[in-house]
Image (cartoon, helix red, strand yellow):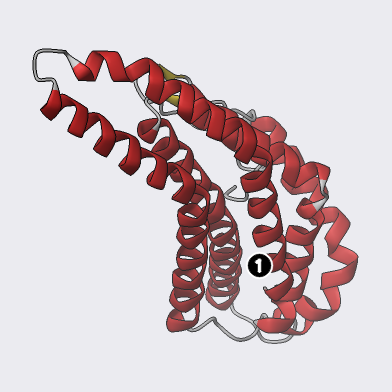
Amino acid sequence: MLMPGFGAQRVPMRVRLFIALSLTFALAPLLVPAVEPATTGNVTPVALLGLIASEALVGAILGLMARMFLLSLQFAGAAIGMLIGLSNTPDTMIDEDEPAASLTTLITLTATVLIFLTELHWEMLRAVVDSYGTVPVPHQMAANFGLVKLVDAVTDGFMLALRICSPFIVYSLLVNLLFGILGKLTPQIPVYFISIPFVLAGGGFILYFTSAEFLQIFIVTFSQWLQRL
C-alpha cells in the first residue's frame, strides 16, 4: 500500500490486491510459527482485532519509511527543475495523482525502476519478515519507537535530497549572482529574458553529467538503509 513501486497510485487497485494476497500466501509458511502462539488459547475477538491493528500499523510504518526516500527524491527533482528553470512545464505524474514537472517524473520513475532492477524489493519483503522478530506479535509496538524510526527515515531522506541537489544549488547561486551583476552593469538590457537560455543550457549540461551519479547515490543510500532496518 505504501512501499515504492508496489503502492504507486497508477497501479490498478485489483493488481495491488492480488500482490498483497500472493505475498500473504508466500510468506505465511515463514510467519505462522511466530503468529500462531498469539492467536491460540483464550483469545477474545477484541484482542485479535487489537493484534490486527498493531500489525497493520507496523507494516504501515515500514512502508512509510521506505516511501520517505522516494518522496525525498521527488522533492529533489522538483528543486532541480526549479533551480535550472524547468519547473514551468507541469506534467502528469506516473506514480502519483498530482501534476509535477516532467523532470521530476523522469527522475522518480527511473528510481522506481532501478529499485526493481537491483532487486531491492526483495529487501523490503525481508524487512517485513524480520519485523516479526523485532516486534513480536503478542507485544504492541511502542509509539516512540515508530516515531523515532520515521524521524530517522525523514532525516536520511532529506539529507539524500540535499546531496543530490547540492551541485544545482551552487550552480543556481553562481549564475543568478553573475546575471544580477550584469543587470546592474547594463540596466537597459532585459537580462532576465536573455539569461533563461543560458541557465537552461548550463543546467542541462550539469544534469547530463550528474544524473547517473545521483541515481546511484539514491540506490546505494536506500540499500544501506534497508540493510540497517
Q: Is residue 192 above or below residue 221?
A: above
* Quarter where residue 183 is shown: top left
Q: Nearer the viewer, residue 49 or 143?
A: 143
Q: Is residue 147 left or right of residue 45?
A: left
* Quarter where residue 7 is shown: top right
Q: Residue at x 83, y 50 (%)?
A: 119
Residue 55: horizontal and vertical position, in percent?
A: 61, 69
Residue 159 appears in the rendering: yes
Q: Quadrant of the C terminus?
A: bottom right
Q: Amino acid at mark 1?
A: Trp
How many marks overall?
1
Q: Is residue 109 left or right of residue 76?
A: right
Q: Is residue 1 left or right of residue 186?
A: right
Residue 205: horizontal and vertical position, in percent?
A: 55, 28
Mark 1 — residue? 225
Q: Residue at x 48, y 38 (%)?
A: 77
Q: Nearer the viewer, residue 78 or 20?
A: 78
Residue 136 appears in the rendering: no
Q: Residue at x 52, y 50 (%)?
A: 164
Q: Is residue 134 above or below residue 196?
A: below
Q: Nearer the viewer, residue 84 or 39?
A: 84
Return the residue found at the far front. Answer: 185
Q: Is residue 1 above or below residue 205?
A: below
Q: Nearer the viewer, residue 184 or 228?
A: 184
- Mark 1, other Cα within 10 Å: few <14 / some 14–19 / many ≥20: some
Q: Secondary structure at mark 1?
A: helix
Q: Is residue 30 above or below residue 148?
A: above
